[in-house]
Image: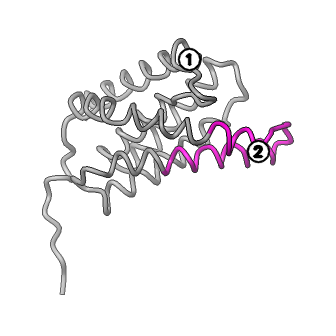
């Protein structure tokens, strides 16, 4: 179990370093890919809600620290995203081919809306038109391009979870 924690931390740390150093500077049609978010989705789908929330918190803390941003903003959003994608993976998303694609698309949209709402609540000046219209669609498409390679890498490194092979027995 602790070896899984080390492998997961290494994956997330590498994703945060690559995101901060290289991927965040990529701007295609107004959108930027989010490698950390796609990695979080892959880990959450494979390991569940608790792992997703913990990895989301750590990834957010690492991103906020690397970018010298306000501590806790990204952690809050990624913790919630990791938990809910993990719940989807535990309940309905088991062994479905479309689960990573659907999860990345939905969580990218909800992450953008949540970040916008959080900045509005905190009183930061933001332009909703730029975030929701100009950057959202290219961001979703770029994240979808990253989905299969990242999911395949995470699945290869972490392996299949124990609960995915268990048979569900209905009572009654």
Snapshot quadrant of residue 145: top left
Q: Residue at x 19, y 52 (%)?
A: 164
Q: Are marks 1 and 2 in contact (CB under 8 Å)?
A: no
Position above or below: 58 against 103:
above
Say whether residue 97 is left or right of residue 75.
left
Disc assigned to residue 115 = none
Q: Position of residue 17 (x, y in %)?
A: 49, 16
Q: Is residue 89 above or below residue 4?
A: below
Total numbered badges shown on the rendered structure: 2
Q: Where residue 64 appears, x then y in whole percent? A: 63, 25
Q: CA distance from mark 1 to mark 2?
A: 24 Å
Residue under numbered circle 1:
20
Where residue 128 is drawn, which disc sits there? 2
Secondary structure, magenta segment, majority class: helix
Mark 1 closeness class: few <14, some 14–19, many ≥20 residues within 10 Å: some
Of all residues, the one furthest to the front in this rendering is 29
Residue 169 quadrant: bottom left
Q: Nearer the viewer, residue 55 or 151?
A: 151
Element on which disc 1 rests: helix
Q: Position of residue 158 (x, y in %)?
A: 24, 32
Q: Which residue: 76% across, 44% down?
A: 129
Does the magenta portion include 118?
yes
> Horizontal placement of 94 versus 30: left or right?
left
Left or right of 76, for residue 52: left
Q: Residue at x 67, y 37 (%)?
A: 73
SS for callout 2: helix
Q: Quadrant of the C terminus?
A: bottom left
Which residue is situated farthest in the top direction here?
21
Which mark is nearer the camera, 1 or 2? 2
User: At which x and y percent is residue 34?
Assistant: 51, 30
Which residues lie in the magenta part?
106-135
């Amino acid at each position: 179990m602790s070896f899984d924690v080390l492998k997961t931390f290494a994956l997330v740390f590498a994703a945060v370093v690559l995101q901060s150093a290289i991927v965040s500077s990529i701007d295609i049609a107004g959108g930027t890919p989010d490698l950390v978010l796609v990695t979080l989705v892959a880990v959450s789908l494979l390991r569940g809600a608790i792992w997703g929330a913990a990895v989301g918190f750590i990834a957010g803390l690492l991103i906020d620290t690397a970018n010298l941003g306000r501590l806790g903003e990204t952690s809050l959003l990624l913790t919630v995203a990791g938990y809910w994608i993990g719940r989807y993976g535990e309940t309905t998303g088991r062994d479905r081919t479309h689960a990573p694609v659907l999860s990345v698309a939905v969580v990218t949209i909800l992450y953008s809306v949540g970040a916008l709402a959080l900045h509005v609540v905190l009183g930061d000046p933001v332009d909703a038109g730029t975030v929701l219209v100009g950057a959202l669609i290219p961001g979703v498409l770029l994240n979808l391009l990253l989905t299969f390679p990242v999911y395949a890498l995470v699945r290869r490194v972490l392996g299949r979870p124990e609960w995915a092979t268990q048979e569900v027995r209905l009572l009654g």
